[in-house]
Amino acid sequence: MALLEISQIRKTYATGEVALRGVDISLNGEEVVAVLGLSGSGKSTLLRCINRLVEPDSGTVMLDGVNITKLNKSALRKARRNMGMIFQEFNLVERLTVLENVLSGTLGSSGTLRSIFRAFKPEDVKRGMALCARVGIIDHIRKRADQLSGGQRQRVGIARALMQRPKILLVDEPTSSLDPKIGAEVMDLMSSISKEDGIPMLISVHDVQLAKKYSDRIVGLQNGLKIFDDRTATVDSESLDRIYDMAS
Ligand SMILES: Nc1ncnc2c1ncn2[C@@H]1O[C@H](COP(=O)(O)OP(=O)(O)OP(=O)(O)O)[C@@H](O)[C@H]1O
Ligand SMILES: [Mg+2]
């Protein structure tokens, strides 16, 4: 069985907006799968349905044999540790330091009280610092998150996700708030971490070139439906063009 198995996920928001119309994706260990689609095609909704930040209306998500869609609140909290999420808007806690933001990746395991008193375990602090060094922000660990540049902020987001020791990384347009050069550095960093640590990534992008450069497989999403699912090396330009037909 695949590490991640998404079947027939549907989501209509309370506004009546239909975001997903029955999407299937399966992802095996150690691969990078890009979800490619225009704005509004449902990419963020899909990624958020996997860890139930958005509750899907129907369908199932299996991660490493666990049916995520069936879990109660406390079991879900535990299961979410296995899914490291990296966001377009970084989602850092602005008034906390870099290191505190990274360490908040252990929240699931150390409980809320511990985090309120910021009494992180010494071994977690050590690991958090090592991760800060790895993603290139060790010189900034005592700065508040709101004092960082966009690229530095996303590096904090990456370190925070890794802090959880995730089985998979769910990455939602990680570079669209960054200029192209910094975006490329962030993509290179995530890509090398994914390969070195053998952590698969599901990453949403709206840029074909990014999808082609960094993924092993591309899933095309259009208007809440999967319209192709091909190895990146063999995906044909017609499929890619179809995604953008909607725009014209
Ligand atoms: N919280 C919400 N309430 C109502 N409708 C929503 C909500 N979030 C998203 N939608 C709608 O669902 C559809 C899919 O949105 P989604 O954000 O998943 O797309 P996306 O592919 O991530 O777009 P983008 O590239 O702009 O981030 C859109 O029509 C959007 O307007
Ligand atoms: Mg989005």
Image (spheres, rainbow, N blue to C red):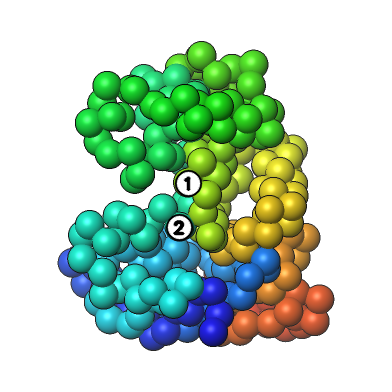
Q: Nearer the viewer, residue 195 or 23?
A: 195
**Amino acid at the residue labelled 2:** Asn
Residue at screen point 55% across, 45% down: 162
Confirm or deny contact between disc 1 and disc 2 (CB under 8 A). Answer: yes
Image location (x, y in percent) of residue 183: 67, 42
Horizontal side, residue 200 vs residue 117: left or right:
right
In the rendered image, is residue 94 in sight? no
**How many other residues sit within 10 Å of disc 2, few (<14), some (14-19) or many (≥20)?**
some
Residue 85 in view here: yes
Front-most of residues 211 and 162: 162
- Badge 1: few (under 14), some or many (20 or more) residues near its Cα, within 10 Å? many
Vertical comparison of 231 with 156: above or below = below
Tag 1 residue:
164
Residue 18 in percent (x, y) is at: 31, 75
Total marks in image:
2
Position of 243 relative to 73 (above/below): below
Label 1 SS:
loop
Location of residue 149 in the rendering, given as x and y in whole percent from the top left corner: 58, 24
Q: Which mark is residue 82?
A: 2
Q: Secondary structure at mark 2?
A: loop
Is 46 left, or right, of 239 in this rendering?
left
Viewer-side residue, 117 vs 191: 117
Residue at image location 80% in from the left, 81% down from the top: 234
Q: Position of residue 44 (x, y in %)?
A: 43, 60
Horizontal relation, residue 239 to residue 84: left or right:
right
Q: Quadrant of the N terminus?
A: bottom right
Query: At 35% from the left edge and 44% from the top edge, which residue is drawn?
Result: 109
Residue at 50% in and 30% down: 123
Q: Quadrant of the C terminus?
A: bottom right
Q: Which mark is residue 12?
A: none
Specify the amino acid type for callout 1: Gln
Please tell me which of labels 1 and 2 falls first in the chain.
2
